[in-house]
């Protein structure tokens, strides 16, 4: 593909548009590969195995990469290709899109690893999927979900925040819900692989503070009780109260009330 730098009069906006489209195409191709691999017995693969395959360290080096390993390599290449753009101040939503896309790849991969019967029976697909996800992948999901929330919170102007696209608001909401559910899983763990994810009380408070900041931000820019961003705030608050004691939430950061 020809570099954008080869064209005259290309600005930051042009670069961001091309970067975002190419990122979405990677995610789209991943979903297509997942659909094609659904009926294969060799779909399940741990994060560590995917890493080994993507590095070429697998004993079966002549075999094609799994959909996860292939997409991880594509995302790495995408990040390298757009490194200069990502370092520019006006690229924060491209960065947000990258972390949200990576989060979706990891979540959907682990969802598809569940048996067809398990996916059908799951009344709470998110909780079921996370419960069957290995600790290394959960750590990665925590990282990318938190980056999404932090990127949106870095928007200083409330008016600008309020008029961001519905897509950006939704991606941020989903990332916050993902964070809460992973933190619930980590907090309730007693034995097993999940114990490898150890969070101190200070680290947990940091996560809860940022999630609460997001709920407060949605409330602040809402124009009324029926506004969609008010519903986002209520959803985050309800999800947090269903997982953490009220005093723990308030200890991290008071959830604002109108």
Image: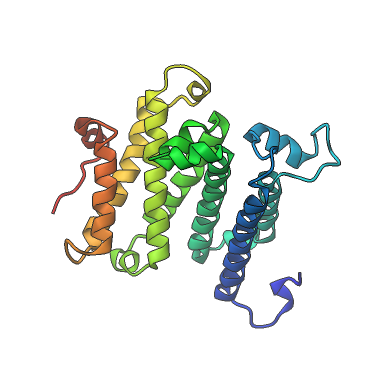
| Residue under the image location 59 percent in, 77 percent down | 11
- Lateral position of residue 150 relative to residue 106, left or right: left
Specify how the rendered protein is coloured: rainbow
Q: Would residue 203 be seen by someone viewing this image from the given angle? A: no
Q: Would residue 251 be seen by someone viewing this image from the given angle? A: yes
37 or 174: nearer the eye?
A: 37
Among all residues in the image, which is located at the extreme top? 191
Which percent across, then down, holds residue 76?
67, 51
Question: Where's the C terminus, which quadrant?
Answer: bottom left
Among all residues in the image, which is located at the extreme right? 62
Which percent across, then down, holds residue 240?
28, 39
| Residue under the image location 61 percent in, 71 percent down | 18
187 or 34: nearer the eye?
A: 34
**Image quadrant where residue 202 sits:** top left
Q: How many marks?
A: 0
| Residue under the image location 50 percent in, 45 percent down | 144
43 or 56: nearer the eye?
A: 43
- Lateral position of residue 128 relative to residue 212, left or right: right
Vertically, is 105 above or below 115? Answer: below
Which percent across, then down, holds residue 2?
76, 72
230 or 81: nearer the eye?
A: 230
Among all residues in the image, which is located at the extreme bottom? 9
- Lateral position of residue 135 relative to residue 248, left or right: right
**Image quadrant where residue 210 sits:** top left
Vertically, is 203 above or below 123? Answer: above
Question: Where's the N terminus, which quadrant?
Answer: bottom right
Which percent across, then down, holds residue 115?
56, 37
- Lateral position of residue 54 relative to residue 20, left or right: right
């Amino acid at each position: 593909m020809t570099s954008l730098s080869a064209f005259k009069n290309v600005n930051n906006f042009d670069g961001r548009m091309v970067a975002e489209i190419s990122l979405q195409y990677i995610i789209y191709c991943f979903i297509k590969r997942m659909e094609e691999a659904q009926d294969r017995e060799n779909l399940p693969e741990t994060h560590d195995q995917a890493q080994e395959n993507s590095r070429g360290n697998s004993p079966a080096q002549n075999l094609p990469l799994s959909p996860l390993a292939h997409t991880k390599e594509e995302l790495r290449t995408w990040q390298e290709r757009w490194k200069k753009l990502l370092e520019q101040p006006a690229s924060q939503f491209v960065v947000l899109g990258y972390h949200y896309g990576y989060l979706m790849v990891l979540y959907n991969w682990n969802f598809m690893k569940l048996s067809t019967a398990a996916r059908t029976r799951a009344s709470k697909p998110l909780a079921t999927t996370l419960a069957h996800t290995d600790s290394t992948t959960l750590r990665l999901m925590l990282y990318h979900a938190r980056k999404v929330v932090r990127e949106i919170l870095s928007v200083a102007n409330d008016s600008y925040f309020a008029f961001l696209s519905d897509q950006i608001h939704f991606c941020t909401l989903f990332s916050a819900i993902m964070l809460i559910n992973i933190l619930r899983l980590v907090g309730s763990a007693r034995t097993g692989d999940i114990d490898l994810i150890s969070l101190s009380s200070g680290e947990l408070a940091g996560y809860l503070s940022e999630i609460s900041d997001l709920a407060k931000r949605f409330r602040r820019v809402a124009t009324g009780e029926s506004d969609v961003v008010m519903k986002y705030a209520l959803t985050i608050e309800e999800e947090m109260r269903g997982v953490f004691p009220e005093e723990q939430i308030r200890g991290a950061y008071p959830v604002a009330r109108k």
